Amino acid sequence: MVGLEPVHKKEFQLERIILFSDAVFAIAITLLVLEIKVPEIEGNTDQDLLNTLLHLTPKFVGFFVSFFVIGQNWIVHHKLFGFVKDYNGKLLWLNLFFLLSIVLMPFSTALYSENVRINLSFIIYCINIIATGLFNSFLWNYIGNAKNKLSDLSEQKDLLKFLIVRSLAVPISFTIGLILSFISPFLAKFSPVLIFPALKIINYKYKSVVEKYKRK
């Protein structure tokens, strides 16, 4: 049983979970850039090269959005496991499903950037990122539940609430984009920019909580 493991073995197993997760994040980011292939240029002038690169704009936009979404999730995942003192089977499965949504992102990004004018490709992309955000939120809820005895977050309810609310900023922004895609596909494409004001509002609302735990 997990609870009967020696402390040093438990720490080693947690380290394995973190290292495996980090490897998945690294692979996902690497796969993102592999989708941007050096184009064949028709001609040999600067203008020909510029025109060819302009055709790659959707790929670069998709890459940068997904890169920062994956990067932000990696930072949050790093913080999350900084609170974890123990683990169980359910935590492993939740983490695995979270990583599944991360490793699918290069595919959904490529699908969207290759078919930027097809609304369904954007819908699939949104669903992928929403799933990632929700699994992230589930992880925070699970480790923060006192019944699971996986962390001390249950004793810091204000901090836990802030972390859960903050984890929902990205999925809520893309949910708005998903809804807009059925009304105005053009406007829906701009939904990722909502992430930044959403995070700013959340950080401002919970400013006292952040400052409180920074001082500790």
Image: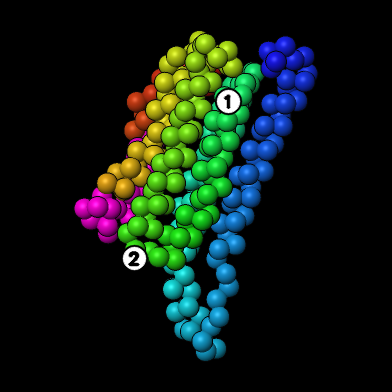
Q: Position of residue 102 (x, y in %)?
A: 53, 44
Q: Considering the image in quadrants, where does the N terminus appear?
A: top right
Q: How many marks?
A: 2
Residue name at image x 65 percent, y 40 percent: 22
Q: Position of residue 3 (x, y in %)?
A: 68, 13
The magenta-colored residue range is 180-200
On the image, numbered disc 2 is attached to which residue?
Answer: 117
Q: Is residue 124 magenta?
A: no
Residue name at image x 43 percent, y 16 percent: 158
Label 2 SS? loop
* Res 113 label: none
Between 138 and 85, the one lying in front of the other is: 138
Kind of residue at disc 2: Arg
On the image, numbered disc 1 is attached to which residue?
Answer: 91
The relative height of residue 23 versus residue 118 in the rendered view (above or below) is above
Residue name at image x 51 percent, y 87 percent: 42
Between 61 and 19, the one lying in front of the other is: 19
Between 110 and 197, the one lying in front of the other is: 110
Q: Quadrant of residue 77?
A: top right
The relative height of residue 41 versus residue 57 in the rendered view (above or below) is below
Kind of residue at disc 1: Leu
Looking at the image, tell me whether mark 2 or mark 1 is earlier in sequence order.
1
Label 1 SS? helix
Residue name at image x 47 percent, y 54 percent: 108
User: How many angstroms separate mark 2 from mark 1 (CA)?
Assistant: 39 Å
Q: Considering the image in quadrants, where does the C terminus appear?
A: top right
In the rendered image, the residue lying farthest to the left is: 183
